[in-house]
Image: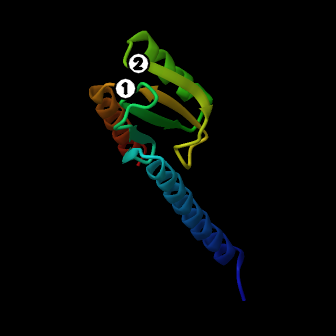
Amino acid sequence: MLTTEDIKAEITLIESLLLTKKRQLTRLHAIEHGFQWQEVSDRILILRDPQERYGWKSCTYLGFTTKKEAEDCLSYVRKNKLAAGVEGPRQAERIVGFKWELKCCDLTRETVERCHKKQTEAIATAA
């Protein structure tokens, strides 16, 4: 007989599989439209457009759990002029598993690396 813990474990597994499939779908959709896809981490994604069809070489998507986190990052990026253009915060479209995202066109490589380092440190601190 199944217990509530068994069912909770099954739900967790199904949610994980669904998240994986959503990521695969998002990735394939981008590739089918001619973009190059690079997942830096679960919350940092870079799309490159070799043809520069939209006026940018790359778009970096940053995922956030809360709108406040996204707004704080948006202020920082704009204040320091780290990207050619920024959209958001908006409901996450590319970053699967997060509620909010920023879309930053031609974000500097240093900024991407800094974001990744900051995220890694936050995860290590929480553990």
Q: Nearer the viewer, residue 49 or 98?
A: 49
The circle on residue 84 is 2
Question: Which quarter of the figure has residue 22?
Answer: bottom right
Question: Which quarter of the figure has residue 4?
Answer: bottom right
Q: Position of residue 20 (x, y in %)?
A: 51, 61
Q: Amino acid at mark 2?
A: Ala
Is label 2 in a helix, a strand or a loop? loop
Identify the residue at image location x=41%, y=44%: 35
In the image, is 12 to the left or to the right of 27? right
Q: Position of residue 86 (x, y in %)?
A: 49, 22
Upstream in sequence: badge 2 or badge 1: 2
Is label 1 in a helix, a strand or a loop? loop
Q: Position of residue 91 (x, y in %)?
A: 63, 36
The circle on residue 114 is none
Q: Nearer the viewer, residue 4 or 50?
A: 50
Number of marks drawn: 2
Outermost residue, left direction? 110
Residues marked 2 and 1 touching at CB (< 8 Å): yes
Q: Amino acid at mark 1?
A: Asp
The circle on residue 106 is 1
In the image, is 122 to the left or to the right of 14? left
Placement of 9 over or under 40, stated as above or below: below
Identify the residue at image location x=63%, y=74%: 10
Placement of 89 over or under 35, stated as above or below: above
Placement of 36 over or under 101, stated as above or below: below
| Residue count near mark 2 (Cα–Cα under 10 Å), binned few <14, some 14–19, many ≥20 | some
Q: Nearer the viewer, residue 17 or 37?
A: 37
Mark 2 to mark 1: distance in Å?
6 Å
In the image, is 86 to the left or to the right of 123? right
